[in-house]
Amino acid sequence: MNWLDRLRFRLARDADGADQAEVFFHAIMDGASSFYSLGQRQAWANALPREAATWQLRQRRLTTFVADLDRRCVGFCELDLNASHIECLYVWPALQGNGIASRLIELACDHAREQGHHTLYIEASLMLAPRLLASGWESLGESAVEREGERLPRVRCKRQLNDTVL
């Protein structure tokens, strides 16, 4: 059986917290290495503790969709419905490029649409932005966030939810 056949998508559970911490860390440190310097990636990865409890608390305030492979979280997308905003999206580096991020975004967009939202926003990394723009998201311009003295460029994007999603 192909590993893609074992991939499932669901809402996050407390037990996913430790995996989310690891996916977050490795997606930044390894997955984004072609787009951001080591200093930028270290500052970004240090923005949230590498502890399950941090991610479990985030699950309580954000709708979190998980890509589950053999009962392990290998990717996740956090949706803040109050702000019509995708807070973050991360996939384990070795699994990137297999449609996991696309499916997680699709789930977030579908859920937001079902909740009556018409538009979603995201501050996309330099790694994610080209894929979003190629799939119909609109750029609202470049922005940056500063972490530990490092400037992290990103692209603010929006998506009308009546469109086909990524």
Image (cartoon, helix red, strand yellow):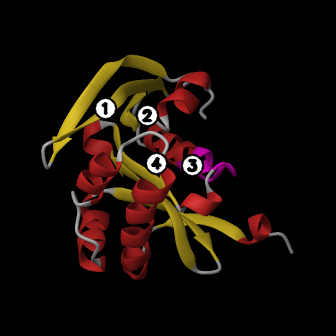
Say which amino acid is labelled 3. Ala
Kindly state the secondary structure of the residue where label 1 is placed: strand
Residue pictured at 48% horizontal, 23% vertical: 160
The stretch of residues the image draws in magenta is: 97-104
Kindly state the secondary structure of the residue where label 2 is placed: loop
Q: Is residue 98 above or below residue 57?
A: above
Kindly state the secondary structure of the residue where label 3 is placed: helix
Residue farthest toward the left in the current orientation of the protein: 149
In this picture, residue 149 sits left or right of residue 113:
left
Q: Nearer the viewer, mark 2 or mark 3?
A: 2
Residues at marks 4 and 2 touching, judged by CB atoms closer than 8 Å = yes
Whichever of labels 3 and 1 marks the residue nearer the N terminus, that label is: 3
Q: Main secondary structure of the magenta part?
A: helix
Say which amino acid is labelled 2. Leu
**Residue linked to disc 2:** 126
Residue 20 position by quadrant: bottom left
**Residue linked to disc 4:** 32
Say which amino acid is labelled 4. Ala
Say which amino acid is labelled 1. Pro
Magenta stretch contains residue 75? no
| Residue nearest the viewer, comparing 154 with 42 | 42
Res. 163 visible in picture: no
